Structures are given as C-alpha cells and as structure tokens.
C-alpha cells in the first residue's frame, strides 16, 4: 500500500464531511488566529446571523497590522496617529469581549505579530490545522501543521462553525540537499526557491520542504522558509516535525505537558511522510551553492544573488514596467546600489535569531549617514528577550530606531512607511509596488544583508562582515 | 449575494501578469471595519497620480472603459495578500467577472464567495481579449462558457459548489451550518 504524505495524514484527520463532486470537504480547524484588520467584517457576519462563536477557546486574537510601533502610541502619552486604525483596535476589543475570544491587547506583554506569537506560546503544534485571515499563515507549517491564509468571509465561517469548506489541494515536494554556506540564511534559500519556480509556481499546491538542508534548519529558520510559500503561490508550506520541533515546543506555556505531552509526541512522530508516499510534483535544490539573495523588481520572484547583475530583458512590458518603477536600467550590478531605508522586521524575519544576525553585523558600527533604519521585533516577548541580551543597545548605538512589535513597514498601513521614490532594503516578504508606501522601492533580503547595507549605505554582501576580526 | 447567471458586457483590459492584491487595494485603505465603499480605492495608485488627479492613460480611466463589468487581466491575478477587500473593492467598482489565464488561490476563493466570477480561459481566447479591449463578451455561468463577439466559445472550469452558490445567490455559511450535527459528532470523537 502506498504511504501517505504529511499533508494527507493531517487532512484525513480533519475531514468532518468528505468532499464529493458537488461539494467540498468540511474541514475542521484546530486553531484560528485573528487580528484587527481582517476580522471586523467576520464578526459583523455573526451578528447579522445571530450566531455565537462556536469554540471561542480555539480562537486567539492579537493586534499587529494597523497598530503603531511608537512606544507612546502603544502605551499611552500620544493617541494612535491614524484614527481609523484606532477604531479597528477598539472594534477588536469590543468583538473579543462580546464573543468571549481571548485577546492580547495593545498593552499585553504577549502581544505581537500573529505568526510570531502562535509558535512562541506553543500554540502552533504539529498535525494541527491552523488558519488566519492573513496569507502568511503558511509560517506555522514549519511545525508540520497544515496552515493557510483565508479571507474574512472564511474567518466568519470558522468563528461560526470551527470549519471551512475546502477542496483537497495537490502536493509539491521541494527537496533541498546540501547545507547552507556561511553567511547564507533561510531567507536567501526561500528567495532562491521563489526565483526558480516563480510567483505562481506553487499555485494549487501545498509544499513540503524536505531534505538535509531543511533538517539542519532551526525552527525559526524553518518558519522563514514556510512563511514565504505564499510568495510562490502556495497557500501552505510544511516541514515534517522532528527532534528540533519537539525541543522548541517542550515547556512552552500553551504546549501540552505531562502525559498529554507524551501522547502528543506519539502522534507527532507518526506524522512525517511515509517512505514511498507520492507527491503530485517534486523539485530539487542544492543549498550548498547558494549565495545571499536580493530582489530587484516588483515581485519576490525577481531576485538575484547580491553579487549578481539585474537581468536585461527586451520586449517584456511587465519587466520594463518593473524597471521603471524601481529606477533601474536592467543589466547593472545590484551591489552598491544606494539605500535610503533599512527595515528589519515582519513575520518573515523578526524573531530573536533574526535580530541577533542583524546585531552581529551592526556591532561596533554606525549606519551610514542619510540612512534611516527601523528594527521592529516580531512580538513583545521577542523585544524583551532582545533587550535582555543587549541587542537594543547595539541597534540604538548604531543609529537605528528600536520599536514596539507589529507589522510596521512591511505593509505601510500603521504610520511606518517608506517615502516615495526611496530605496528600502527590507527583511519582509513583499516588494510589490507601493507595499511599503506609495512609490516606495523595496529590495527584499536577509537580516545580515539588510544590516550590512545599512552600514555601507549601499547594497552590500553580508559576507564582507563575516571575516572581520 | 444576488444570483448571477449571465453577464453581457464590454471588457476593460489590464494585461500585466501578477497583479497583486496590494495593487487592487493598497493596505492603507484597509483600516476600515466595513466592506462597503471600497470601489473608490480600487487600483488607487494606478488610477490616481500622487496629487489625487486621475491618470488619463490608465486603462480603467479611459472613456470606453466606463461601465465595463468584465475585467480581463494577465496571469496570476490576485496574488499576494489574502485581503478580501480586493474582491469587495472590485465588486463595489462595478466588476462582475475577472477573466485571466491564472487566478491566485486565496483571491479566487474570496472572489467566488462574494459572487465575483474569477475565471480562467484558454490562452488563445485570452490573447484575443487582451488585443481587443472593449469587446462585448457574454458569460454563461451555468454552461461555463465565455462567448466572443464572433461567436467563438471558450469553456471555463468552475468548482461545482461555487457555481451552485453563484447561480443561486446563496453563501456557503448556510451549508456549513447544516452540518452542525456532523461537526458535533467529529468533536466528540476527537475528545
């Protein structure tokens, strides 16, 4: 008998009503995460139908997208600068109170970006189905969970029924052999993968990342990889759980404990894809040949090694448009391009290890004159941990701003934006036109590349900082 | 949601591939708690210059594009963010259908749940539509056909349940709620 994939095992366990030709499967959701921007219309749907939240203990709410990162706006002293964002914050407070949903409000020490706090609390667990009204829900797949983004109507469905209607997606195995070289990060790996398969290469698939290079990654690195699955078009990316996963989870406040932990482990150990399980498609990569990567265009698939040149393409209107927007000719080296803004943050790269990487480059340096650098921890817990080891001092002494947690400059809807025409090196996930602010020009890269570029004021290969005494 | 069986309309065309939901509606317009009135901001940074003036050269701003209910767009339309504000904005602007050669997964799911017909046609029909903005097309939701002005028909696939919901103007919530007992049983079995 053919073996089952990790995806299939999780799917099968969560089917409430199987799919037919006429109807999708009713799929049970174990954990629903929600935030202030995509939930108000869903709570309105409940009110219109007079429905309660079916399982309030399976939903957790936080505030991250439109919330400010300036301390005085978060903790008082100044009002939230954007009125409509302040209204969203109040609306989420009201909805959570009225429907009995747990909320980490603006003052909570547990608040943070929705995809950072699930894992750090131990809520994100192998074998679970996890959804959120946010496309980067794919992050949680790093734990061997089936996790994907949904729209607000579906947020309402989950609140009302703890279920979603889903057609079973196809599976894509991405086998990554070798090992990442020094100075090359998980961010560079996923950027290289998207560069190869393109921004729609994963459409219709759930990706399982496999192979020696993936096994060697820490949990935080696996989260970075799974996070950007959606940038390749895949709603979900997964990594099979292993000892690295279990070691990360053990002892976290919302992880199972005692006998429950032992029972959970038994099921989690059976989750990895069986030998002989078949995937609908398979791709292979070699991690050992990778270099630090950086995007040059207006989607995450437009990416080159930091040491490389921007491609030149004629008779390609979309490419020409991207070059025009970015202010590039095509054909030039990406290295040494001037930088105005550097952003270290987002659900892709704002965990403690990301901040450590950026700090290790910045230690003993100042950012270049004229460069503005923002470091925004992914959660208040990440912030506290970073401060406990003095990372905040390194950032501040280098000339960067150190903020409260939130999505910040990743999507320019909370007061943190990149001015029109300026170049931003960002550790976030999207370089779309206007993503960081109308007219902003975004180059996506890893935390070390962002930090090295901040010091030089130009796009810089972070490996130049590796051999420094 | 109103039942939608037939659409007959001229087309507006945005031929670029990979039009992401940040273009359809930039994040700064998402600080709303309602789903209404978003059409004003659809493609905001393409429709308006930084000073707020309409950009006359942008396809949707041309006189002949006014009132079009079918948007023909390049492949991988709606990639990126899961914001349902994207289909809400397109519907509020007046579109009833998006015709492409590829639609991003989350956008398609969101669009169909709101009665915005997001469909994929064959490359040849799509290429013809891209070359002929303003062409009058007819879409038959039940038959799954898009008819070009010369009578050429192109079939588009549509998930059966989404088709049922769009044809009848019903949303999925009622169907999900009808399975309450199955969900109860599932929860009891899982413990």
Image (tube, coloured by chain):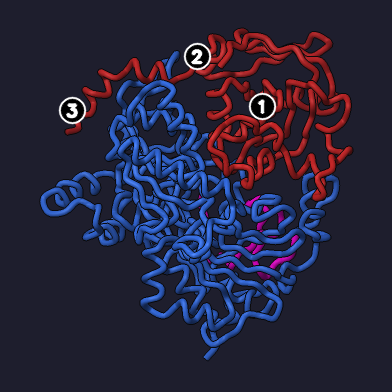
Chain colours: A blue, B red
Residue A211 place in picture, x, y as percent: 41, 55
Residue B157: image quadrant is: top right
Quick one: quadrant of the N terminus of chain B? top right
Q: Which residue is mark 3?
A: B188
Answer yes or no: are tags 1 and 3 on the same subunit: yes
Q: Nearer the viewer, mark 3 or mark 2?
A: 2
Mark 3 → mark 2, Cα distance in angstroms: 30 Å
Quadrant of the rendering where the C terminus of chain B is positioned: top left
Which residue: 63% across, 25% down? B118
Asked if both marks, 3 and 2, belong to the same chain, the answer given is yes
Q: Is residue B118 above or below residue A328?
A: above
Above or below, B19 against A16 in this view is: below
> Is residue B114 placed above or below A117 in the rendered structure?
above
Tell me if residue A286 can be seen.
Answer: no
Question: Residue at left 53%, top 37%?
Answer: B33
Q: Chain of mark 1?
A: B
Q: Tell me the magenta residue range.
A: A283-310
Q: Return the residue at label 1.
A: B92
A415 or A290: nearer the viewer: A415
Q: Residue furthest left?
A: A259
Circle 2 chain: B
User: Residue tagged by mark 2?
Assistant: B170
Front-most of A374 and A128? A374
């Amino acid at each position: 008998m053919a073996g089952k994939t990790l995806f299939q095992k999780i799917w099968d366990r969560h089917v409430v009503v199987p799919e037919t030709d006429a109807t999708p499967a009713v799929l049970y959701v174990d954990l629903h995460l929600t935030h202030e921007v995509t939930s108000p219309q869903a709570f309105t749907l409940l009110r219109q139908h007079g429905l309660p939240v079916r399982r309030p203990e399976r939903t957790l709410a936080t505030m991250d997208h439109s919330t400010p990162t300036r301390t005085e706006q978060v903790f008082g002293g100044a009002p939230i600068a954007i009125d409509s964002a302040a209204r969203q914050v109040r609306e989420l407070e009201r909805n959570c109170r009225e429907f009995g949903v747990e909320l980490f409000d603006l003052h909570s020490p547990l608040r943070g970006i929705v995809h950072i706090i699930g894992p750090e609390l131990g809520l994100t667990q192998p074998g679970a189905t996890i959804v959120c009204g946010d496309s980067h829900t794919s992050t949680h797949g790093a734990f061997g969970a089936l996790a994907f983004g949904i729209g607000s109507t579906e947020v309402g469905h989950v609140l009302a029924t703890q279920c979603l209607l889903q057609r079973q997606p196809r599976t894509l195995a991405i086998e990554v052999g070798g090992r990442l070289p020094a100075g090359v990060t998980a961010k560079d790996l996923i950027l290289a993968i998207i560069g190869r398969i393109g921004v729609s290469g994963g459409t219709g698939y759930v990706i399982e990342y496999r192979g020696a290079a993936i096994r060697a990654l820490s949990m935080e690195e696996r989260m970075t990889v799974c996070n950007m699955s959606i940038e390749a078009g895949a709603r979900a990316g997964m990594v099979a759980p292993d000892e690295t996963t279990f070691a990360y989870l053990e002892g976290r406040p919302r992880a199972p404990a005692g006998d429950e932990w032992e029972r959970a482990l038994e099921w989690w150990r059976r989750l990895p894809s069986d030998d002989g399980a078949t995937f609908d498609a398979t791709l292979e990569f070699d991690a050992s040949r990778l270099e630090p990567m950086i995007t040059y265009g207006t989607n995450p698939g437009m990416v080159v090694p930091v040491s490389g040149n921007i491609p030149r393409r004629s008779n390609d209107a979309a490419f020409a448009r991207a070059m025009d927007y970015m202010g590039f000719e095509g054909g030039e080296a990406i290295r040494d391009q001037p930088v105005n803004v550097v952003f270290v943050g987002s659900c892709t790269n704002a965990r403690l290890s990301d901040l450590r990487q950026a700090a290790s480059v910045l230690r003993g340096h100042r950012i270049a004159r004229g460069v503005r650098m923002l470091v925004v921890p992914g959660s208040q817990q990440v912030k506290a941990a970073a401060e406990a080891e003095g990372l905040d001092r390194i950032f501040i002494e280098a000339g960067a701003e150190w903020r409260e947690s939130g999505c910040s400059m990743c999507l320019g809807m909370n007061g943190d934006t990149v001015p029109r025409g300026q170049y931003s090196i960002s550790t976030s996930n999207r370089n779309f036109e206007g993503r960081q602010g109308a007219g902003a020009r975004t180059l996506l890269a890893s935390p070390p590349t962002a930090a090295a570029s901040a010091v030089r004021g130009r796009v810089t290969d972070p490996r130049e900082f590796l051999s420094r005494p | 949601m109103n039942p939608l069986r037939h659409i007959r309309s001229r087309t507006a065309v945005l031929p670029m591939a990979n039009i992401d939901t940040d273009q359809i509606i930039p994040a700064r317009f998402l600080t709303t708690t309602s789903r209404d009135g978003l059409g004003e901001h659809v493609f905001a940074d393409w429709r308006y210059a930084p000073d707020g003036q309409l950009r006359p050269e942008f396809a949707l701003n041309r006189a002949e594009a006014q009132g079009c209910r079918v948007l023909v767009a390049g492949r991988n339309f709606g990639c990126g963010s899961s914001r349902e504000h994207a289909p809400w904005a397109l519907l509020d602007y007046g579109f009833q259908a998006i015709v492409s050669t590829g639609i991003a997964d989350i956008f398609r799911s969101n669009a169909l749940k709101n009665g915005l017909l997001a469909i994929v046609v064959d490359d040849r029909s799509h290429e013809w539509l891209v070359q002929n903005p303003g062409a009058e097309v007819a879409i038959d939701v039940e038959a799954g056909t898009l008819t070009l002005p010369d009578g050429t028909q192109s079939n588009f696939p549509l998930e059966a349940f989404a088709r049922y919901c769009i044809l009848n103007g019903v949303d999925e919530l009622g169907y999900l709620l009808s399975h309450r007992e199955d969900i109860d049983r599932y929860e009891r079995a899982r413990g």
